[in-house]
Amino acid sequence: MRKIMEEKSDEEWVLDLQNIADYQFGKGAGEGLFTGDIRIERSRTGRARQIHSGEGYIATHTKGGRLSLGIEGGKRLRKSIEFPAYRVMVGEESEVYVREGKNAFAKFVVEVDPSIRPKDEVMVVGENDCLLAVGRAKMSADAMLDFNRGVAVKVREGQLE
């Protein structure tokens, strides 16, 4: 006989998601990402999957238990964690392309959070810390600064503004 688990309420999921964000991005990130009017879309099993606010898509809670950011999540995260945490800064010659959702290449990276590792969720910012895009790091921070070729960040969503 299978035990039926009680489904978590949205409030319980928000607390869990805040804890995940604090673990993944550092203290304070969870509250910055998941405050205000939060709407959670669930999977067939009742797990939180897509997290939205009135402003837009914040993040996806992946099957691996981590958060995958949307542009609204990037905006919120940038305000809640201090520079240079989880940021990859690119020069202005590549800003327009990254804003359009194109990948950020290592040769254009001018500054980067030294703790970034491949597969980390990151924000791509311009030289004045304006959010350009969100995506996943494809190489370490050192490699981004040392290499003149290759994709530094696989961009998921650009910020057209």
Image (cartoon, rainbow, N blue to C red):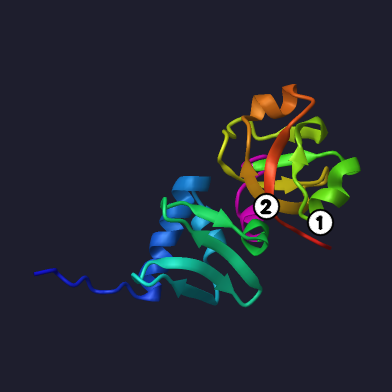
Q: Amino acid at mark 1?
A: Glu
Give the residues drawn in magenta, as a range.
Answer: 76-86
The reply to whether residue 111 is in sight is: yes
User: Is 81 left, or right, of 110 in this rendering?
Assistant: left
Image quadrant holding the C terminus, namely bottom right
The percent position of residue 147, horizontal first and vertical second, equals 74, 24
The secondary structure type at the circle numbered 1 is loop
Real-space Cα separation, disc 2 to disc 1, in angstroms: 11 Å
User: Is 111 left, or right, of 72 in this rendering?
Assistant: right
The secondary structure type at the circle numbered 2 is strand
Residue 100: assigned label: 1
The reply to whether residue 26 is in sight is: no
**Residue occupying image coordinates x 61% and y 68%:** 57
**Residue occupying image coordinates x 47% and y 74%:** 41
Check if residue 80 falls in the magenta segment.
yes
Looking at this rendering, what residue extends furthest in the top direction?
146
Residue 12, compared with residue 146, is above or below; it is: below
Looking at this rendering, what residue extends furthest in the right direction?
93
Verify CB contact (< 8 Å) between mark 2 and mark 1.
no
The percent position of residue 134, horizontal first and vertical second, equals 67, 52
Q: Amino acid at mark 2?
A: Val
| Quarter where residue 55 is shown | bottom right
Image quadrant holding the N terminus, namely bottom left
The percent position of residue 37, horizontal first and vertical second, equals 54, 77
Which residue position holds label 2?
A: 134
Graded by Cα atoms within 10 Å as few (under 14), some (14 to 19) or many (20 or more), the crowding at tag 1 reads some
Q: Of marks 2 and 1, which one's residue comes earlier in the chain? A: 1
